[in-house]
């Protein structure tokens, strides 16, 4: 494809060019690489990419470019990819390749309605990926995406799919630019960037401001006539390293005096062209950064020859640049923003109205409907804006773009009360309540469950007293379902109760069956299993009678949890398989995914870890084909998949899977567990990030585990106990029932107490409070472990052993029992408790047995890459040598330091007593911790007492 022209020289970008040319060279050699190019507005990202594109094309690389556009609150699904495919479709050389991937025609408006096709989104993504791979197989391909900060969510999702599979197609390079200064804290691009930069084959390149010397070189290169040194210094100072500002300041140097603001600076160039050219620029600014020739001609109302003359002038002055497909774009988005901002309100509204009318006359697909909605709204034609927003929402739904559908529906709902009744669109489902329910579903499908709850509450508030009972019931049970996803269980039960009471069971109806199915889940969540079981059995009979297959499947899933031994039992699994088949036959993907998740978690809870993985694979494949990878059950399955790999000790595979399929928030929790176990320094900060707003139950679950364990590992019992208590309190439901994870949290917190109790147990009574805390934690664990499976019982055994260790000593028998309990398959935790067992054996004088177990733990730690565990195993091995060969691992000076540590002395105080510097004392303390395998001074003292390296000081008694 042709490249747009540019007049400014490229100065000061040798390093950036070198990195990007290396990426091109890897593509030519058969590799795949992506680079995210960031920088402030005007710093020179586009100029850099232009240069790379020209060099790539000259070196035999095929270059395609897609742009994201800022059109306010309008969402244009897949816009940059639509632009790229449009260019390819217009080039006859690619007709055969495009024909081999017919699904991508959807992005060109030529595909069928896919709103009822659960697999359409995946096929679209795979079709686009396959198209690029086939093009790259024929000739090296450079894909450039500009201005990602304006990208719609569907484009972001497609980019995630293209880059997130771990390995890019051979001979494909992707360069994607974005404005770093536009990324506020809640910008939707930020989480995607955080995911992408962790992937293999994706790197980030920051385009920094030019150095002062480079700006001066650019000034002299831009200005043919000589400028005084004072003028150059003034431009350098004001440009602040920004290439675009530099160009504008140089262009303004001919004027009488320099402009005071950026907008004034940008407008000077505009005011220097003819009035006709200014009119064309103003008209183009309302269209956006890019506009087609015919549309611009009709909007400006100029004869062809006058328009061409004005365009030639604007292009010659470097205000516009000509693009492919007879389009024109502002050379820089800042220039377009300045021209648009300078329009009078009346001019702006009139031109928006003109564009809206022209687009309406032309017809078109999703992009045209979205653009019409934008232009009508800005022209204050609210009835047409409302109709266009509803139409654009329908287009987005058919394209599988729920986030954009949500934006258009919210725009329609915002406009609805401002439009007279007679001017509103009419038809089935075209009322505020129905549109709000549609918006709620779109929010849920795009993963924004809190927004789904808010919208369903709005639908409830808009339901009149005399509303159709079935619609009123549907609103309430939908709200109940959404509330359960954010763990507002009591309110969910209240609304599901209302929904069920609004419509009679006879004559039977699908609305009643779904209301009943929702009520069953809500009743079970609040602990009313009797009601849940009664309603489920009644509703199942009705569902079978009226052929409500999907609802029948949903009820079978609930009954599998309620009857017999729960979902861990063989009977429950058989029922869940039946539910899965029913949901699949009914084409109800959410219910199918609930069945698959239930099958997977049932296997996990019963200890059948390897049997769990095929169900997870099936469930995630279904979610991926349906575009529901961000739905609640899909996220839980993504977490569970990583958890199974973590538990089985397949840590490197776990990390690879997480990188290849990045998931938001809690779903990558097991990767955090690995990071902590391997001693990675950012594990705690990443866990703390999960505890922000809005509240997320699973995020708090994962973050609480990591932070409690981290505190215990560094020997901080106060922090460990506080974290465990806080997380249990937050995750307990409205009835005060503690979550199942309580037993694990209690065991982790208990692990921090014995060392502190031993260190403080010198007769002054300070250990009593730790014994009290240990008793409280073990009681929490006992209560939470009731009716749990093998995993929960293993954690209870560990909690009991830690409690024994804290209150009465090593507890060899308790640790032996714990080691046996962890044989269900948790490789890392089995090694950790086995090391505790080895420590207990060593303390009991059974050094040979202790060494045998410590060596086994060390082997596991090396395989996992768990360096802290390996170091602790080495310390136990060092202390478990046969008695006749045993020597203290500490030097005489270190034993002196350790004795003072046990008395609570600081490094400075140790130095004063031993006549050494505080720095030297600190070195001795670090050596002691390393030799004893201790994470803290307190733990080192406890180990020293246990191993009889020092003896307790006598205490004075009053």
Image (tube, rainbow, N blue to C red):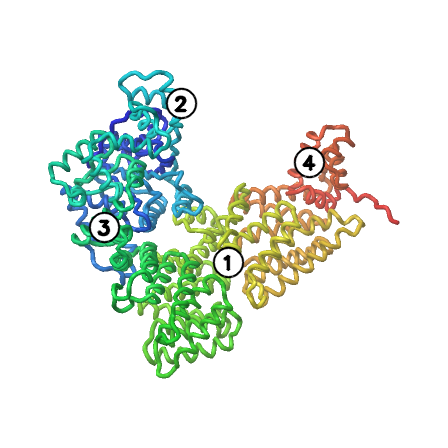
The tag earlier along the polypeptide, 3 or 1, is 3
Q: Nearer the viewer, mark 1 or mark 2?
A: 2
Of discs 3 and 4, which sits in the foreground? 3
Which mark is first along the chain, 2 or 1? 2
Question: Badge 2 is on which residue?
Answer: 212
Mark 1 → mark 4, Cα distance in angstroms: 41 Å
Q: Which residue is found at the position 42% from the left and 55% from the top?
A: 638
Q: In the picture provided, is 880 more to the left or to the right than 576? A: right
The residue that disc 3 covers is 353
Residue 762 lies left or right of residue 237; in this view the side is: right
Disc number placed over residue 925 in the picture, else none = 4
Q: Which mark is residue 697?
A: 1
Q: Nearer the viewer, residue 349 or 759?
A: 349
Earlier in the chain: of badge 3 and badge 4, it is 3
Distance of label 3 from label 1 (alpha carbons): 47 Å
Whole-Å distance between the Cαs marked 2 and 4? Answer: 49 Å
Q: Are marks 2 and 4 in contact (CB under 8 Å)?
A: no
Q: Secondary structure at mark 2?
A: helix
């Amino acid at each position: 494809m042709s490249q747009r022209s540019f007049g400014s020289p490229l100065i000061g970008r040798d390093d950036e060019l070198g990195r990007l040319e290396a990426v091109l060279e890897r593509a030519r050699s058969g590799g795949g690489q992506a680079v995210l190019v960031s920088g402030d507005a005007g710093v020179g990202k586009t100029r850099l990419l232009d240069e790379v594109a020209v060099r790539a094309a000259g070196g035999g690389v095929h270059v395609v470019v897609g742009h994201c556009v800022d059109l306010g609150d309008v969402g244009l699904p897949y816009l940059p990819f639509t632009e790229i495919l449009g260019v390819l479709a217009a080039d006859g050389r690619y007709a055969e390749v495009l024909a081999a991937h017919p699904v991508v025609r959807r992005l060109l408006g030529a595909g069928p309605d896919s709103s009822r096709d659960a697999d359409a989104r995946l096929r679209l993504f795979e079709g686009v990926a396959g198209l690029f791979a086939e093009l790259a197989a024929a000739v090296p391909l450079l894909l450039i995406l500009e201005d990602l900060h304006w990208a719609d969510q569907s484009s972001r999702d497609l980019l995630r799919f293209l880059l997130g599979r771990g390995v890019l197609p051979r001979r494909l390079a992707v360069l994607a630019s974005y404005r770093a200064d536009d990324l506020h804290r809640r910008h939707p691009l930020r989480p995607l960037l955080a995911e992408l930069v962790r992937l293999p084959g994706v790197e980030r390149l920051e385009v920094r401001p030019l150095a002062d010397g480079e700006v001066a070189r650019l000034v002299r290169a831009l200005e043919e006539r000589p400028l005084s040194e004072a003028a150059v210094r003034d431009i350098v100072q004001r440009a602040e390293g920004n290439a675009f500002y530099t160009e504008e300041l140089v262009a303004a140097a001919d004027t009488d005096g320099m402009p005071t603001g950026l907008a004034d600076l940008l407008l000077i160039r505009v005011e220097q062209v003819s009035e006709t050219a200014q009119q064309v620029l103003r008209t183009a600014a309302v269209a956006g950064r890019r506009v087609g020739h015919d549309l611009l001609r009709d909007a400006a109302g100029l004869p062809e020859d006058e328009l061409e003359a004005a365009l030639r002038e604007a292009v010659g002055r470097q205000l516009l640049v000509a693009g492919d497909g007879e389009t024109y774009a502002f050379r820089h988005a800042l220039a377009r923003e300045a021209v648009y901002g300078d329009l009078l309100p009346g001019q702006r509204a009139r031109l928006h109205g003109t564009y809206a009318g022209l687009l309406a006359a032309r017809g078109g697909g999703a992009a045209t409907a979205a653009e019409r909605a934008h232009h009508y709204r800005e022209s204050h034609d609210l009835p047409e804006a409302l109709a266009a927003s509803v139409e654009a929402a329908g287009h987005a739904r058919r394209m599988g773009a729920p986030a954009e559908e949500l934006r258009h529906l919210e725009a329609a709902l915002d406009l609805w009360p401002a439009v007279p009744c007679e001017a509103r669109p009419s038809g089935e489902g075209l009322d505020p309540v129905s549109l709000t329910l549609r918006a709620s579903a779109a929010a849920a499908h795009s993963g924004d469950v809190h927004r789904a709850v808010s919208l369903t509450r709005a639908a409830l508030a808009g339901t009149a007293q005399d509303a159709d009972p079935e619609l009123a019931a549907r609103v309430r049970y939908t709200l109940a379902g959404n509330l359960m996803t954010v763990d507002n269980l009591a309110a969910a039960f209240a609304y599901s109760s209302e929904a069920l009471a609004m419509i009679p069971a006879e004559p039977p109806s699908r609305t009643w069956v779904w209301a009943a199915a929702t009520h069953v889940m809500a009743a079970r969540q609040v602990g009313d299993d009797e009601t849940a079981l009664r309603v489920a059995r009644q509703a199942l009979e009705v569902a079978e009678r009226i052929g409500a297959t999907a609802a029948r499947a949903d009820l079978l899933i609930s009954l599998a949890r309620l009857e017999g031994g729960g979902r861990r039992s063989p009977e429950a699994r058989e029922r869940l398989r039946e539910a899965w088949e029913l949901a699949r036959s009914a084409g109800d993907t959410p219910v199918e995914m609930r069945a698959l998740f239930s099958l997977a978690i049932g296997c996990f809870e019963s200890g059948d870890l390897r049997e769990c993985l095929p169900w997870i694979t099936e469930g995630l494949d279904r979610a991926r084909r349906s575009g529901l990878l961000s739905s609640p059950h899909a996220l839980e399955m993504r977490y569970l998949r990583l958890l199974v790999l973590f538990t089985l000790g397949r840590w490197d595979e776990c990390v690879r899977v997480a990188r290849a399929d990045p998931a938001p928030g809690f779903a990558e929790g097991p990767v955090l567990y690995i990071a902590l176990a391997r001693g990675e320094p950012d594990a705690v900060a990443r866990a703390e990030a999960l505890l922000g707003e809005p509240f997320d139950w699973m995020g708090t679950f994962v973050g609480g585990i990591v932070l409690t364990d981290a505190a215990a590992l560094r020997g901080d019992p106060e922090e460990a106990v506080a974290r465990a208590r806080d997380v249990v309190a937050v995750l307990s439901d409205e009835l005060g029932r503690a979550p199942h994870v309580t037993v694990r949290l209690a065991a982790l917190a208990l692990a921090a107490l014995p060392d502190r109790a031993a260190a403080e147990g010198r007769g002054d009574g300070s250990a009593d409070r730790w014994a009290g805390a240990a008793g409280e934690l073990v009681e929490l664990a006992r209560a939470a472990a009731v009716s749990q499976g093998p995993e929960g019982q293993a954690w209870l055994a560990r909690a009991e052993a830690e409690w024994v260790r804290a209150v009465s000593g090593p507890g060899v028998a308790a640790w032996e029992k714990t080691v046996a309990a962890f044989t269900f398959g948790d490789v890392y935790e089995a090694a950790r408790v086995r090391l505790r067992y080895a420590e207990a054996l060593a303390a009991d004088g059974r050094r040979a047995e202790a060494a045998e177990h410590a060596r086994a733990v060390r082997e596991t730690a090396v395989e996992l890459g768990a360096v802290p565990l390996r170091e602790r195993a080495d310390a136990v091995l060092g202390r478990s040598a046969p008695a006749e060969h045993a020597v203290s691992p500490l030097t005489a000076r270190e034993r002196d330091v350790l004795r003072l540590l046990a008395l609570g002395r600081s490094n400075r105080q140790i130095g004063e007593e031993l006549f050494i510097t505080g720095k030297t004392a600190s070195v001795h303390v670090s050596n002691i911790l390393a030799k004893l395998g201790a994470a803290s001074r307190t733990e080192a003292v406890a180990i020293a007492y246990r191993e009889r390296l020092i003896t307790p000081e006598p205490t004075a008694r009053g």
